[in-house]
Image (cartoon, coloured by chain):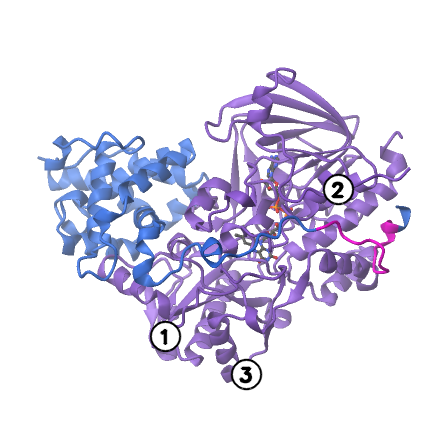
Chain colours: A blue, B purple
Amino acid sequence: MTTRNQAADAVAPLAQVSRRRFVKTALWGTGAVLALAGGSFAILRRSPLDDVSKPASLVHLSAPEYHLFNRAIEVLLPIDDGGLTPVDQVPVMANIDHTMGLVDPAVREDIRIGLALFDNAAVVAGLHGRRFVDLDRVDAIAYFDSWSRGNVLQKALQTVVKKFVYVSYWRDPATWPPVEFDGPVSDRWGIAYLGNAPLPDESTSDTASGEARA
Amino acid sequence: MQRIVRVPQDGVPVTEARDVAADPSMGRKFSIKTDVVVVGSGAGGSVVAYEMAKAGKSVLVLESGKYYPSAEFTEHLGDTIHEVYRDQAGQANSTADVLFIEGNCVGGSTVIGACVMHRLNPSVWQDWADNHGLKDLAPDKIAPYTKIVDRWLNVHVNEAHEINATAHKVIQGCERMGFSWRPVERNVKKCALTGHCLAGCPSDRKMSALVTHLPWAAAYGARLFADTHVTRVLERGGRAVGVEAVIRDPKTGSIVSDLRVDAEVVVLAAGAIHTPLIMQRSQLADRSGRIGNGMAVQPFVQVLSTFKEPVYGFRGALTGVQVDEFQDTDGYFFISGLAEPEQLMAVGEQKAGDAHIEFMKSYNRMAGINAFSLDEGSGSVVWEGGLTDGRKVIKWNPSRKEFKDIVRTTALASRILFSAGAERVWLPTFEKMHADSVFDLDDKLRSVDYGINGLYTFRMNTFSPHGSARMGVDPYESVVSPDGEMHDVSGLYVADASLFPTPVAAGPQWATQVFAKYVSDRILARGSNHFLG
Ligand SMILES: Cc1cc2nc3c(=O)[nH]c(=O)nc-3n(C[C@H](O)[C@H](O)[C@H](O)COP(=O)(O)OP(=O)(O)OC[C@H]3O[C@@H](n4cnc5c(N)ncnc54)[C@H](O)[C@@H]3O)c2cc1C
């Protein structure tokens, strides 16, 4: 088992991303910051989920990333009062996987490091003692909220996770009727297609000097 | 002899990567000779392509993005972002906290633009004429160009039916605050009021380059290649002689062909981020040291609010009115607008869990304002690394002054919304906050500390970078001459948002198109220097 000291050492880069250091490293780009923070930690605590494989349909997400997003979806989108479209009716995970596939490979690598850090840092951050994937709902929300007030790296990472989840849910048309968003309307309204604009009439007087040459 | 010029009824004739792949005569490597090669088919490039083709020049337009014809538009922002927004709308500064949103498709950002055609105040043109030596930009000299842009692109003041419920809330707030406002001017013909501008206009009512200058240019014989990324400008003895490009399959990213274009004139119109990157990759002389430097960002934040009653602020024309009270004095402008749910997530996602659900359940009671501020023009873009394995780096974080301006624009936008009766304003900060009164607002805003470089404070975005290869008289102070030609390379022109001489407090599309028309005339006027025939 990881000791408290080992854990603290492992995520030290996160705690130590002092403002001064961040600014310096930020000059190399976020990737470098993430590499700096994430490069030196190992998995801090095993999770029962580590033995659970990911669905075969997911092309771009690794198994740990799948588990992370699964937990994030559960806690970020608590749609259980019937008001909004249930999460299981929206291909949120497939959308996340697809988006991950579109990201530039170098950026994707940075995101991967960041996600691993987000998951593991929960072991020590806020003294949860468990990885993010194993936090209960209240602790998981508290984790997101405290990171939204944390250092720049924490703000960045919680934003990445939320953005993946929220965009992947709300981009699906099935989620729109409950919030009364109309979605595509042109066909439904029978909007006539106008096509290309005709060539401009250049005969009128308000032409620029160059028109004279024509 | 009279030429018969026919504009295609819809669409633009485009050579795509798959056409190149299917044509054995082109092969893995081929070259084309042309009078003028235009790099980028957006607001600026499309205008130049038309003007050159109309003047009888052979024109080749190279566009890195794909051809996404309006017949395929879905009015679904998520799909569109994946198809035509550069880096899936994830292009960001080096600290990844400011998004630089840009179109990457035939027609460029005009295809996904919000249609606001923001005239520059005559005092801006006058300043450029008086204080920057750009005499031909004086209001009376530039007026003929501005008139053409207005007329050809159907720029008109929003009529009553184009002012939606969000805009009405903004008007109400402004009236109570005593702030000046006015309907925005837009480049739309018979707007269908769908509110889907950011996903392209499927009925072709938005006068984007896709339905105006590009098909017009094609009618005069201009050729257009999509999926074609220009890597560098070819230069011989201080003179531009063409460009090199790679054609990639947009689905797999694999290289289909290498292209070399030999041209008498090269026009860079790849936008304020990419034009200087091409110059840097080409290792062109840079006496001023300003290639890619001095970029204005014009950051904006999206301030959302919730009202007691349903507003349906997302219905109708996306952009309705603009608050111009602070434009000339402080460089702030505000534009009404509330986009689709996904856009709210992309530019300013909210709290976690129940708080997020509560936020989204109030979507039909929301109204929004986009609050823009004039920055100091200290952004930069740098190509780091080699020609083929390097990467772009965009640098901009707010200075203390710029940060204060963002706080102030947020405060003003919030006050307008509270005055219109908003119960809650959602602050555009990384640490999620809301305010339920103006008193609460001031306390909350005070708690946002500038910290180091304003990093991860406000959720800032920009879609209007400009001035990254500025126009000016002095080659030690500017990148391009008053004609739009690079000081140090003859035959190489810039005709996009890069050449703004100073930062402006206005959406840049209108002025970019005015500049492009102006530069076109300059190229033709100097024709004997460039063209053989
Ligand atoms: C979502 C959105 C909404 C906007 N709304 C408004 C608005 O309402 N009002 C307003 O005034 N402005 C608006 N803008 C900004 C406006 O569209 C731009 O300021 C304007 O289009 C700039 O024109 P440009 O020619 O410099 O660049 P663009 O129109 O962006 O065109 C540049 C083109 O060059 C291509 N390119 C880049 N690199 C290469 C390369 N290496 N090789 C080949 N091609 C390349 C790009 O793919 C692109 O098509 C908006 C922008 C966006 C993204």
Vertical relation: B284 (above or below) B20: below
> Residue at point 80% right, 58% down?
B142
Three-letter amino acid code at the position of disc 3: Gly
The mark found on residue B307 in the picture is 1
Identify the residue under disc 2: B6
**Left or right: B465 in relation to B51:** left
Q: Chain of mark 2?
A: B
Q: Amino acid at mark 2?
A: Arg
Q: Is residue A151 visible?
A: no
Above or below B39: residue B34: above
What segment carries the magenta color? A198-211
Which image quarter is the N terminus of chain B in?
A: top right
> Reading the chain from its start, which is encountered first: label 1 or label 3?
3
Mark 3 or 2 closer to N-term? 2
How far across and down, in percent of the image, does residue B151 sit?
A: 74, 59
* Residue A183, percent from left and from top: 41, 56
Question: Do marks 1 and 2 both belong to one polypeptide chain?
Answer: yes
Marks 3 and 2: CB-CB under 8 Å? Answer: no
Rendered location of residue B188, percent (x, y): 62, 59
The answer to whether residue A159 is above or below residue B441 is: above
Image depth: mark 1 or mark 2 in front: 2
The C terminus of chain B sits in image quarter: top right
Confirm if mark 2 falls within 8 A of ligand 1. no
Disc 1 element: loop
The residue mark sitting in front, 3 or 2, is 2
CA separation, marks 1 and 3? 21 Å
- Give the alpha-carbon distance from disc 3 to disc 2, as whole Å: 51 Å
